[in-house]
Image (cartoon, coloured by chain):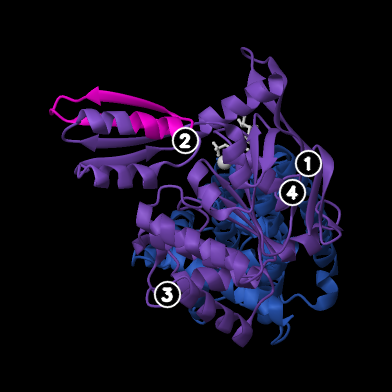
Chain colours: A purple, B blue
Amino acid sequence: MLIAENVRKVYQVKEKKGWLRQQWTEVEAVADLSFRMVPGKIIGLLGINGAGKTTTIKMCSTLLTPTSGTITVDGYDAVKDDRFVKAKVNMIAGGERMLYWRLTGRENLQYFGSLYGLQGQALRNRIDSLLLQVGLYEAANTPVERYSKGMKQRLQIARGLINDPRYLFLDEPTLGLDAPIARQLRKHVSELASQHGKAILLTSHYIHEVEELCDEVYIIDKGRLVAHDTPEHLTKSLHLDTALQVVIPSLSDSLDYDLRQLAQDYGGSREIAETDEQTWEVTLRGKTDMTTPLLSLLAAHQSPVLRLSTQQPSLEDVILHMADRRGA
Amino acid sequence: MKQLGSLLWAEIIKEHRHSFHSKMIYFSLLVWPVINFVTAYYSFAPFRMGGDSPLARFISYEQLPLYLLTGYLGYIFYWCLVQSSWQMSFERQAGTMEMIFISPVNRLAFLYGRSLSSLIEGVWLFFCFVLLALFFVDGIRLSGWWAPPLAFLILLVSAIVWGGFLCVLFLFSRDASFLYTVLDEPMLIFSGVRLPPMAFPVWAKVISFCFPLTYALQLIRELLMERASLQTMLPSMGLLAAVLLVLVTATVVLLRQAEKHMKKTGNMVMY
Ligand SMILES: Nc1ncnc2c1ncn2[C@@H]1O[C@H](COP(=O)(O)OP(=O)(O)OP(=O)(O)O)[C@@H](O)[C@H]1O
Ligand SMILES: [Mg+2]
């Protein structure tokens, strides 16, 4: 188990004040954060830019020393016993860095494996199985500079798994990936936890990504924890409305009436607007998902559906809401 | 030990891929050092160092080619490591430095392994050239068959220690590229690559003794040109050993400080 207790990180930042003068200011990136990671579970760290996600991950992976507070990994202190901790953790960041572009995929893994003291047949076997696992077996001997973004990201995952870490930190792993590739990657991440028993900490800007993958979510803002819950509870307790939008070609009086009724039944609201293209845009807002009843209602009225979309509350909405609630 | 071998091998492959992506490399591996050597030779030749020439007190004319050959060999070894440590800034940019420091790899083994592999990659061709040339130059005076291998060993070990030290400096600061300038021409002039430091005025001698290459070259020349026996070499040997000890100690101490500093400020990703 990884236990982070009251972890705080303050950066000292030098500011130039004219020619020779400079001033040190303190930036509190993470404040009083506590959490746990257990094998087989994925926890999510959610926050907007600069919230302190990357800083938290780097402290857990021994790349940064906390200013105060402790992080222990299976009983080892991440600062004092970092040698033991390093063998058990690894980090994967989104983007295309952290690889040697002129080396092939296999050579990259060989290099990083040798940093962990792996060698010979054992290393070759590990590399083969990782390459298969991330679907890069065919491209193993191609230089990384010729890889696509998605392939680089998958190689990063293989790199992050090279030491078979028990604790894996993923820093915005889907950054800049196309939707289908991001989906595939999320599937892989969830398998890493459920089938390989890894404890995973995932950071993201995307609330739906965290909802889909995580067993628990920590929302942080300016380094402070604003909420900690399961994703379901979080969205429920949030009381933030999801907007369901449907575009239909015509609107009869009876349909209009039924729509209002539907919204009322679910404790939500209804808006109707005529668009430029002589169609009607109906928006239902509510805490519960009204997609299924709405579709059956439309079917009953034999109304075609031109477009259907839902709008999740944005992360900013959630964080603002949380911060407000805490303040209140 | 085997783990070290595997790390070394991986470093060599990495180095190889990074340098051997075009044929241009052969230019910097051989053509450039040979041109340097030849230019140096012909700029001295017109002086015809007769008995009255100022340099003749330090190098005999027949030994001039050998003197320059050993000088440039030493310089290429040391310069290769300046370049290699400069590559650290690319590791920083590529984010791979973080991935090295996230691992439990022995930091010293990593630094010295890195130096050794850059050496192997960077000097083999010129080394072969020098080896070949040794058969054609005059003035080789050995006190035993063991002298050339020992000279090679001394050059190799001292260069690796030097390389490890430079790497640490680049770990510490991302603005260490000034070293590149400081170590280029000055090292060539003051370390006695072309001219013996003994011929320098005092102020220049002082600078000379700041470059570890000075001590290494001194020893190598004693071995190859002055028929030095182990006994007569003892003073220079001791001096070089002392210099290397200081470098290794500084490396160990600075390495620890550098990592601590990086973990505190998070500057490992800044470039
Ligand atoms: N090395 C550093 N030195 C000084 N300040 C830093 C450093 N790294 C981060 N910060 C500051 O700490 C705060 C948290 O940064 P961090 O990178 O952890 O945020 P993040 O949640 O990962 O943001 P993003 O979503 O943009 O990746 C920011 O205000 C940032 O400016
Ligand atoms: Mg970040």
**Cα distance in 3D space between marks 2 and 4:** 58 Å
Residue B41: x, y in percent?
Answer: 47, 60
Residue at numbered disc 1: A66
Name the chain under label 1: A
Image disc number at residue A266 = 2
Q: Position of residue A159 (x, y in %)?
A: 55, 65
Q: Amino acid at mark 1?
A: Pro
Q: Which residues are magenta?
A: A259-285
Q: Is residue A234 visible?
A: yes
From what the image shows, is residue A63 above or below residue B18? above
Pick the residue in front: A307 or A124. Answer: A307
Q: Is residue A131 left or right of residue A278?
A: right
Q: What residue sits 68% from the left and 56% below the top?
A: B101
Ligand 1: quadrant of the figure: top right
**Mark 4 — residue?**
B259
Q: Position of residue A108 (x, y in %)?
A: 51, 68
Q: Residue furthest top?
A: A18
The answer to whether dots 4 and 3 both sit on one chain is: no
How far apart marks 4 and 1 lie (CA) works out to: 14 Å
Point 66% across, 72% down: residue: B225
Mark 4 touches mark 3? (CB < 8 Å): no
In the image, A6 versus A162, the foreground residue is A6
Quarter of the picture containing the N terminus of chain B is bottom right
The amino acid beneath tag 2 is: Tyr
Say whether marks 2 and 3 touch (CB < 8 Å).
Answer: no
Q: Nearer the viewer, mark 4 or mark 1?
A: 1
Q: Amino acid at mark 3?
A: Ala
Residue A271 picture location, percent across and down:
33, 24
Mark 4 falls on what kind of element?
A: helix
Q: Chain of mark 3?
A: A
The circle drawn on residue A140 is 3
Residue B49 sits above or below residue B5 on the image: above
